[in-house]
Image (cartoon, helix red, strand yellow):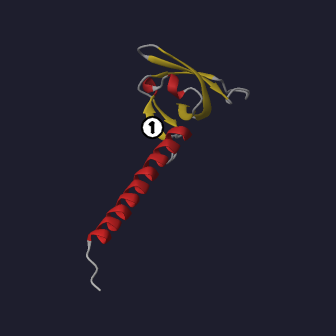
Amino acid sequence: MNYSGSQSEKAVPAGELDRRHVGQTLSFQSNDFTVVFGTIAGIAKTEARVYLALLGVAGGTHLKDEYDLPVDQVVYLQPDPLTSAEKSLSEAGKIVKEKIDEIAKNIRERQQKPDSE
């Protein structure tokens, strides 16, 4: 198996995970046969390993809720809804500002033109 996440997920090395990622959903391939999907409950790091505690994974016959990964192993994060919303609102704000500036410019140009009647 060669898991590479979904199109909506962001690939990051496990070593880049930090407290900002607690509560986010991630996926990764833990071995040749298993892909793990879970919510990050906690992260601990050393220079060589990242230790993840996950919610929503344990309970099966061979599933566990703690994993240790090399810092360079790629994990896949779901987009953070707050960051995505903030980016969308920021982009929408820029578009609205551009339209308002365009309308204001058109009004000024009309006011400066002498009547041609």
Which x, y percent locates residue 84? 50, 43
Residue at point 49%, 47% (across, down): 89
* Image point (52%, 36%), residue name: 77
Above/below status of 20 relative to 47 = below
Dividing the picture into quarters, in which one does residue 105 lie? bottom left
Estimate the x, y position of residue 54 in percent, counting from the top left: 62, 25
Rendered position, 103 above or below 78: below
- Name above or below for residue 117 compared with residue 53: below
Q: In this rendering, does residue 110 appear at all?
A: yes
Q: Nearer the viewer, residue 103 or 56?
A: 103
* Residue 5, visible in the rendered structure: no
> 110 or 51: nearer the eye?
110
Q: Amino acid at mark 1?
A: Ala
Left or right, 77 with respect to 91, comes to right
Secondary structure of the residue carrying numbered label 1: strand
Q: Residue at x 67, y 29 (%)?
A: 57
Residue highlighted by disc 1: 11
